Amino acid sequence: MPRYEGVSPSVVRRLPRYYRFLRELLAKDVHRISSRELSQLMNLTASQIRQDLNCFGGFGQQGYGYNVDALIGEISGILGLERGYRAILIGAGNLGLAIARHMSFETKGFNLVGIFDKKRELIGQPVRHLVISDVNRLENFCGVFSPQVAILCIPPAAAKEICERLIPLGVRGFWNFSHYDLTLDYKDVAVENVHLGDSLMTLCYHMSELTED
C-alpha cells in the first residue's frame, strides 16, 4: 500500500521544487518563512502550498509559518532521499555521460554503482569513481550489487530487451530517456519518463504566445 494514499501525481511533482527552493533559502540563512512569502518566491498561491503540504500532514504553525530546516527534513523523508537506492546507467553516449558526470545522485536519493555500454571503445573508460563496463556483464554485476534502479540512455529499440533482462534481476525503477514506454509491458515497476524534446516543444509554444501579433 502506498505510504501516502490518494496524493495526486501533480502534488508529488511539486515536492522536489519545494525542496529546491527551501534549500536555497537555507543557504541564504533563512530559517523561517510564511506560506505567503514562499508563494511569492515560487509563483504559486499560498493556498496551493498549504493544500499540498497538508496532503502529508501539514507542517506549518499559524502565526509562525514554516520552519525551513524542519520542512526540508520532512520533504526529504517524504521523497525518500535518505534511502540511497543503488542505480546503474545503461548507455554511455553523450547524454549518459553528461548525466553520470554532472548529476549529484547522492543528494537525490540514489547511489550510482555501475555504468554499462556495448561499444568496445567505451568499455574500461573511467567516469567519476566508476569505469564503463560491458553490458554483457550485466547479469553478473546485478548478482553481486543488486541495483534497484536503471537509468536508460539508449535507443527505444534497445530498451525493451534491456528491461527484459533487468526486471528479473530485481530492478524495479527506471529513469527512462529512451522514449520507449515501459508501462505498456511492465505494470509493476516505477517509471519516470524524461522527454527532453517535449520540454523544448513546450518552450516553443510559450515563445509563440509571446511573439503573436
Image (spheres, grey):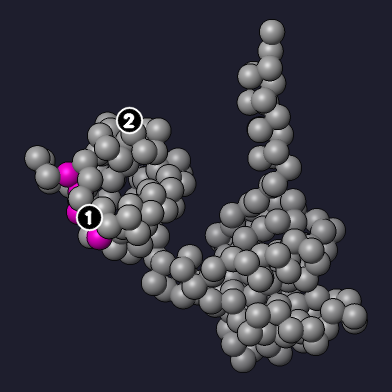
User: What is the three-letter code of the residue carrying label 1?
Assistant: His
Give the magenta part as a residue range. Answer: 65-69
Label 1, label 2: how far apart the Cα atoms are: 21 Å
Q: Quadrant of residue 147?
A: bottom right
Q: Is residue 35 above or below residue 177?
A: above
Q: Which mark is residue 31?
A: 1
Task: State whether residue 94 is above or below residue 200.
Answer: below
Task: Decide: few, some or many residues near mark 2? Use Cα within 10 Å; few <14, some 14-19, many ≥20.
Answer: some
Instruction: Report which residue position mark 2 lands on.
Output: 45
Q: Quadrant of the N terminus?
A: bottom left
Decide: few, some or many residues near mark 1? Use Cα within 10 Å; few <14, some 14-19, many ≥20. some
Q: Residue furthest top?
A: 213
Does residue 137 appear left or right of residue 62 in this picture? right
Residue 68 is covered by the magenta coloring: yes
Magenta segment includes 107: no
Label annotation for residue 7: none
Give the residue drawn at x 43%, y 45%: 14
Q: Position of residue 120 (x, y in %)?
A: 90, 81
Q: Residue furthest front?
A: 28
Task: Compare marks 1 and 2 and give the one earlier in the sequence.
Answer: 1
Between residues 187 and 193, which one lies in front from this camera angle? 193
Residue drawn at x 12%, y 45% is 64
108 horizontally vs 98: left or right: left
Given the image, on which type of amino acid does mark 2 rest? Thr
